[in-house]
Image (cartoon, rainbow, N blue to C red):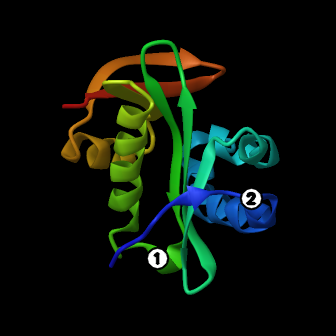
Amino acid sequence: MQFDPRPATPNDLHAVEEIVRHAYSPYVSRIGREPGPMLDDYAALIAAGRLHVVERNGTVQGLVVLIPQHGAMLLDNVAVAPAAQGTGLGRTLLRYAERATRDAGYDRIELYTNEAMTENIALYARTGYSETRRVEEKGLKRVYMVKILP
């Protein structure tokens, strides 16, 4: 199944917030508070052109947030609607993030996730990311990872 990410628009805001809520709410009990992505200002990310979405049958099913940094692109968030999980959409969004990173002139993509999100850490490792460090920031235990792009 082919998915083509497009820049999010203000009309996508509600769907984006719902996807994020569903994707991250299971981690609240593990972490003891809402994960960072649940607190982000998605209207501002949309306005800044940092958020891309994928639609299927006219409904937003997934999203990716990319933020240019000094020397690397930050993969700030990737999330998939529950109905689209297991369809390959998450991997498609990760491939899109890598393509957008290369198109922006970077050869590395970085991310961080909470150490309690063990499934995400394993997924990123399987897709070529390497752990670079673990730190506590803003009261959260974060795992930083990087992928050098060919």
Query: Residue 12: x percent and y percent?
Result: 74, 65
In the rendered view, tell whether residue 52 sits above or below residue 75. below
Residue where numbered disc 1 is placed: 84
Q: Is residue 7 visible?
A: yes
x, y percent for residue 53: 58, 61
Across and down, in percent, residue 111 comes to: 44, 31
Q: Residue at x 64, y 43 (%)?
A: 37
Question: Few, some or many C-alpha atoms within 10 Å of disc 2 (few <14, some 14-19, many ≥20)?
Answer: some
The disc labelled 2 sits on which kind of residue? Thr
Answer with the quarter of the image where residue 59 lies.
Answer: bottom right
Taking the spot 56% from the left edge, 51% from the top edge, the residue there is 27
Which quadrant of the structure image shows residue 39?
A: top right
Amino acid tagged 1 = Ala
Q: Circle 2 is placed at which residue position?
A: 9
- Placement of 86 over or under 46, stated as above or below: below
Q: Position of residue 16 (x, y in %)?
A: 68, 61
- Say if 135 sits above or below 21 in the image: above
Q: In the displayed structure, does residue 35 sit left or right of residue 112?
A: right
Sequence-first disc among 2 and 1: 2
